[in-house]
Amino acid sequence: MTTLDVIVLGAGAAGLMCAQLAAHRGRRVLVLDHANKPGKKILMSGGGRCNFTNLYTEPGNFLSHNAHFCKSALARYTQWDFIELVGKHGVPYHEKKLGQLFCDHKASDILDLLLAECAQAGAELRMHTQIERIEKTEGGYRLHTSAGPYACQSLVIATGGLSIPTLGATGFGYQVAKQFGHALLPTRAGLVPFTITEPQLKALCTELSGTSLDCMASCNGVSFRENLLFTHRGLSGPAMLQVSSFWQAGDTLHIDLLPDRDALDWLQQVQRERGNSELKTVLGEVFTRKMATLLAEQWFESRPLKQYTPAELAQIAERLSAWQLVPAGTEGYRTAEVTLGGVDTREVSSKTMESLKSPGLYFIGEVLDVSGHLGGFNFQWAWASAYAAAQFV
């Protein structure tokens, strides 16, 4: 029986962060993971550049049934703290947009940073290890694993959610939570593309596959100004990913394809000044030629602007500025960046991340019912929740 102070389950962003911080406190720490390599989700994030935090992180960027839960951890380990760690390791980075910080070179710079901190502090990693059984003991927890038995005082669950199962995601953390009496809030895919099956709309998306444009996307009272991307399966891009976290099956999406102008004022002005111009030509001034032609012909029956009545022009403007559609669904966990829902935070200490049901058991990162917006916020939650737990394990 190998006995340690802390065992962390999960060698992802939150798990590695917690392990190195706890080890720097002098704790004997072991990280266990069933995967063959650590940090797989880190490596593929941000298109391989890892959007590791956001300059504008605040509690309002997070979704949870318990909106106040994330405030304490985010206040105690901020984006500036992680940026300082990045600077310490000489990792070059840049702001892409909207406060999103990316590595200049590759995502492995962030993983290497975490592994270097673990090595320096003496935190050990053991990959390819299956957890067969967990038992509560008088002094903590006993784990029966494919690598033999382990005992620890503090057990940290950093196993993530269900998103992107090809990278090794499982519901194991939820099973552990249930075993020790925790309630789970319903899970679903978040930050995920939409699928379209309605034939005419599906044909439009397929024809425009690869086309991207700026828009304002809204659903259930929440709006995001970002890019929309048409795909063969439906709608993607940052705007769609953001709004997907607020969408439920059957809900209507509202999309303003002309967020920088009043569509009706613009069309009326062009009608007055260039009435002989065809609608598709006019739309070609703000959209790609292909998109302008498709919209004009499929939605509006393109003809010279002077031939449209005021009511018809108003209908065109309404369709462009308030396009309404009901997606068939989303692509699900296969491509989702986060899992919404999870371990109910009302049964976890917001100060320490320790279970209120089973002393010595901690939950950090995505396994908890805390999910960030797109743009580096989920990584910042990983760093902050890991820091909170690491001070007490």
Image: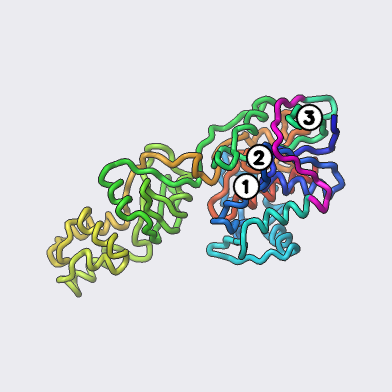
Residue at screen point 79% across, 44% down: 124
Q: Nearer the viewer, residue 200 or 39?
A: 39
Tell me the SS state at disc 2. loop
- Badge 1 amino acid: Lys
Q: In which quarter of the image is the N terminus?
A: top right
Q: In the rendered image, is residue 265 in sight?
A: no
Residue tagged by mark 1? 40
The image position of residue 51, as x and y in percent, is 59, 57
> Is label 2 in contact with label 3 (beta carbons under 8 Å)?
no
Q: Which of marks 2 and 1 is nearer the N terminus?
A: 2
Residue tagged by mark 3? 148
Residue at screen point 34% across, 62% down: 258
Q: Nearer the viewer, residue 129 or 246?
A: 129
> Is label 2 in contact with label 1 (beta carbons under 8 Å)?
yes
Residue 100, by quadrant, is bottom right
- Badge 2 amino acid: Ala
The dot on residue 35 is 2
Q: Which of marks 2 and 3 is nearer the N terminus?
A: 2
Residue 299 vs residue 19: left or right? Answer: left
Q: In the rendered image, is residue 342 in sight?
A: yes
Magenta stretch: give its range: 119-135
